[in-house]
Amino acid sequence: MKIDDILKDKKRSISFEFFPPKTEQAEQVLFETIEKLSSFNPSYVSVTYGAGGSTRDKTMSTVQKIKQKTSLTVMPHLTCIGSEKKEIAEILDFYKSIGIENILALRGDPPMGVTELPDIKDGFDYAKDLIEFIEIYGVFSIGAAAYPEKHKESPNMEFDMIYTKDKVEAGAKFLITQMFFDNRFFYGFLDRAEMIGIDVPIIPGIMPITDLKKIKQLSLMCGASIPYPLNSLINKYGDNPEDSRKAGMEFTIEQCRNLMENNVRYFHFYTLNRWEAVSEIINILKLFPI
């Protein structure tokens, strides 16, 4: 089923992101996580696509296995950086052939250590170009990324919103945000989106905090700022794993609670292929889909 149709019927939606496992043992962990989280009846799950297409085959095989082994609606991520149109078409043809109806279309980042985007003669420069190409197929519900604090390459918030609207006008039916830790950025994004005429569902991407030190490192990589209250927790509990997890989870739970109190209806959790933290958040907040 197409995700934009699913969301129309939902008063509240939860969804989960996974990454393709590298080993047989990691695959077992992933499918244990999928089994545990399936009990929450998620609207859909997604599978990431490594920088520069580095997990192409693993992503495709993981998507196929989830499709075969479960009844979940699964959405593969697809990035266009470093790929020719022919390669993208082959991937889309494969997904179409196995009954996939949803794609999260992204420009993507270059592989680790590479600072410049590759120049591909018959490729795509931006996510909107990829979205336009996927739209031609006429069979996929297309999602795109949104950045509450703006994409790190955007010169300012205004230009970032223009780029975001370009993706919607190209065919994106819903947006999923990068992780953020200060809800004010998300509310500000919603206001800007309304002002510019973006009227598709905007889904906050939530990263459960189970390790305060690691979350600081991760935020630096993706450009998500650390608000003062979270930074205080990092300084106070960062060196104690047990206290770090407890404080981090309390922060995430309160973040989600605030979103719920402000009528946010959709939640997309970055699981890191683990079920425990996400399950805890959902159960404590009674964040069940309706």
Image: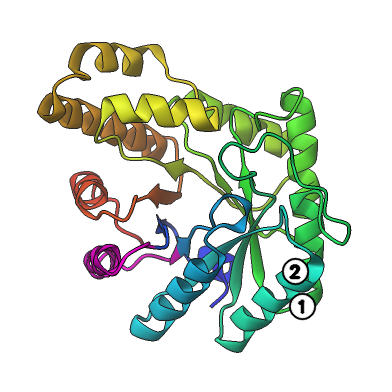
**Badge 1 amino acid:** Tyr
For marks 1 and 2, give the CA distance: 6 Å
Where 139 sits versus 22, above or below? below
Location of residue 123 by image quarter: bottom right
Q: Main secondary structure of the magenta part?
A: helix
Q: Residues within 10 Å of mark 2 (few under 14, many from 20)?
A: many
Q: Is residue 172 visible?
A: yes
**Residue 48 at x, y = what percent?**
50, 57
- Mark on residue 137? 1
Q: Which residue is mark 2?
A: 134
- Mark on residue 290? none
Tell me the residue at 39%/49% (across/down).
269
Residue 32 forms part of the magenta stretch: yes
Tell me the residue at 53%/40% (across/down).
178
**Badge 2 amino acid:** Ile
Judge from the rendering whether residue 124 lies leftward or rightward of residue 192; answer left or right: right
Pick the quarter of the image with the C terminus: bottom left
